[in-house]
Image: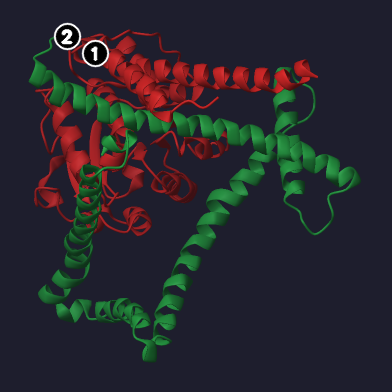
Chain colours: A red, B green
């Protein structure tokens, strides 16, 4: 029995569009890797500590990585953690950094650029930049994204190397997240949290188990779990996440669940048809 | 682009060509503006005396393109050798220090009984050893070796299945991103739907 694959596409399209329009609100369960990441920021970083957030993704994986970035930034700003933003991904990392930082900062009007957060922009040669930042960040990023020398920015006055920071968060697609774990954490000891895309996530579990990472946000599921944790700890952010029309990982997971159910239904249906069609010739004999 | 799901059509071909051309053009622009200009052109222009060594790096880059000229294509192998040698040097310590040693250390787990954790440690050790034996091809996979490598295959299949599940989720996430754009930023303003 052959089903035109366009029927499958139609079911998946309906299963994707309807939950976007009619939000279901399915529960989100928290997994240990995401809890570890949240606990690292919530319990081990204090107000005024510095976190480096590296935008190592571009628009091609923004549906997965952007909600992670938003959740991490909202968590850091709610806790009073100062954030240094960089971008190491060449194809749109900088534009994603600018867009997400501007979007989240608008929700915290009390924050001051250059004091509470700074965007240092994009630097080419990810591994080389990571190694050089262990010696002197000011040589890697002489100015911020607006061209202001780092010496004129209060937040950067006492930041020279990884030793002056408490945490690195990399929101990554591809291999750059691995370099934070197996180069920066291995050689310089700074805790690293990585938010990879779902395609890359399985390989990061090895680093997490070997304690080379302090937490892992795997794909859209990881982002939705982190959003849940942040909303539970900071009820003020619940209003932000309830904004109509705002794309969040939690809403995206509703769609994921429906589409996965559709796929499972088709797989089960296909197997039923396969086994019943196999049985028919035996009955005839 | 999504019209291809129905069938191939000229609009899809046009969009595909635009996408390929724009992507390539964007990448060339990125490389020129964010790699060559700040790291090569501007340092040489502003302070040649302090940055003269960059001329050699630029030269190596140009030499790589000699492979398109048949008579001097062999010269490009020297530049490639420098490139490969540099990355082997950088990555060797990184791989050893950042991957091999920590991962080997993490596999050395206690197998003495201390509750349910021992079971997981046992699974980990059996999994790693059986998979490593599966990939040992210097001996035929028969008898004991064959049996252990079969266990390794099961571990590999289970891990591939988990990775495939994650991949499916990743691809659906990207579909969700595009559908959210179409629904929230295109269809809703057109139709005036209110949530």
Q: Is residue A201 above or below residue A159?
A: above
Using the rendered image of the protein, determine whether residue B118 is visible from the camera's viewpoint.
yes
Farthest bottom residue?
Answer: B71
Percent of width and height locating residue B109 = 71, 34
Q: Secondary structure at mark 2?
A: loop
Percent of width and height locating residue A183 = 45, 51
Q: Residue at x 15, y 22 (%)?
A: B187
Q: Is residue A270 left or right of residue A125?
A: right
For the C terminus of chain B, give its image quadrant.
Answer: top left
Q: Which mark is residue A124?
A: none
Chain assignment, label 1: A
Q: Residue at x 33, y 34 (%)?
A: B5
Percent of width and height locating residue A267 = 54, 22
Q: Is residue A7 above or below residue A236?
A: below
Q: Residue at x 74, y 22 (%)?
A: A281
Percent of width and height locating residue A111 = 12, 27
Q: Which mark is residue A21?
A: 1
Q: Nearer the viewer, residue B178 or A160?
A: B178
- Callout 1: 10 Å neighbours few (<14), some, many (20+)? some
Q: Residue at x 73, y 47 (%)?
A: B132
- Callout 2: 10 Å neighbours few (<14), some, many (20+)? few
Q: Is residue A250 left or right of residue A236?
A: right
Q: Quadrant of residue B194?
A: top left
Q: Nearer the viewer, residue B159 or A54?
A: B159
Using the numbered discs, state the Cα–Cα distance from disc 1 to disc 2 in whole angstroms. Answer: 7 Å
Chain assignment, label 2: B
Q: Secondary structure at mark 1?
A: helix
> Which residue does the numbered mark 2 point to in the structure image?
B195
Answer whether labels 1 and 2 touch (C-beta < 8 Å): yes
Q: Is residue A130 left or right of residue A119?
A: right
């Amino acid at each position: 029995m052959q089903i035109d694959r366009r029927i499958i596409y139609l079911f998946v399209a309906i299963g994707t569009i309807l939950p976007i329009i009619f939000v279901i609100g399915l529960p989100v369960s928290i997994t240990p890797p995401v809890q570890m990441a949240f606990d690292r920021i919530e319990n081990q970083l204090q107000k005024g500590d510095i976190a480096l957030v590296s935008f190592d993704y571009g628009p091609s994986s923004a549906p997965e990585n952007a909600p992670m970035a938003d959740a991490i930034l909202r968590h850091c700003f709610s806790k009073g953690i100062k954030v240094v933003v960089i971008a190491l991904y060449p194809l749109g990392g900088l534009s994603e950094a600018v867009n997400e930082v501007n979007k989240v900062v608008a929700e915290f009007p009390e924050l001051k650029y250059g004091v509470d957060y700074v965007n240092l922009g994009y630097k080419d040669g990810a591994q080389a930049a990571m190694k050089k930042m262990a010696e002197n960040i000011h040589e890697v990023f002489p100015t911020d994204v607006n061209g202001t020398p780092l010496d004129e920015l209060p937040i950067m006055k006492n930041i020279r190397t990884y030793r002056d920071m408490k945490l690195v968060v990399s929101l990554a697609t591809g291999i750059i997240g691995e370099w934070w774990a197996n180069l920066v954490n291995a050689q310089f000891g700074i805790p690293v949290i990585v938010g990879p895309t779902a395609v890359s996530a399985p390989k990061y579990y090895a680093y997490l188990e070997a304690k080379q990472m302090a937490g892992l946000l795997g794909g859209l599921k990881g982002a939705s779990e982190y959003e849940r944790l942040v909303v539970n700890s900071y009820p003020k952010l619940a209003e932000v996440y309830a904004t109509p029309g705002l794309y969040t990982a939690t809403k995206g997971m509703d769609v994921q669940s429906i589409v996965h159910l559709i796929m499972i239904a088709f797989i089960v249906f296909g197997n039923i048809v396969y086994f019943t069609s196999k049985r028919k010739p035996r009955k005839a004999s | 682009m999504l019209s291809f799901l129905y069938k191939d059509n000229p609009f899809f071909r046009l969009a595909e060509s635009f996408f390929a051309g724009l992507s390539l053009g964007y990448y060339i622009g990125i490389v020129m503006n964010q790699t060559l200009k700040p790291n090569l052109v501007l340092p040489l222009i502003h302070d040649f005396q302090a940055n003269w060594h960059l001329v050699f790096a630029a030269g190596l880059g140009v030499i790589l393109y000699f492979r398109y000229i048949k008579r001097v294509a062999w010269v490009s192998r020297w530049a490639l050798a420098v490139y490969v040698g540099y990355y082997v040097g950088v990555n060797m310590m990184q791989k050893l220090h950042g991957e091999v040693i920590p991962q080997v250390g993490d596999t050395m787990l206690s197998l003495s009984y201390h509750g349910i954790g021992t079971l997981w440690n046992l699974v980990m050790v059996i999994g790693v050893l059986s998979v490593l034996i599966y990939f040992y091809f210097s001996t035929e996979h028969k008898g004991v070796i064959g049996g252990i490598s079969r266990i390794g295959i099961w571990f590999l299949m289970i891990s591939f299945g988990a990775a495939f599940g994650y991949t499916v989720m990743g691809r659906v996430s990207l579909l969700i991103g595009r559908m959210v754009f179409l629904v929230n930023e295109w269809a809703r303003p057109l139709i005036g739907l209110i949530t």
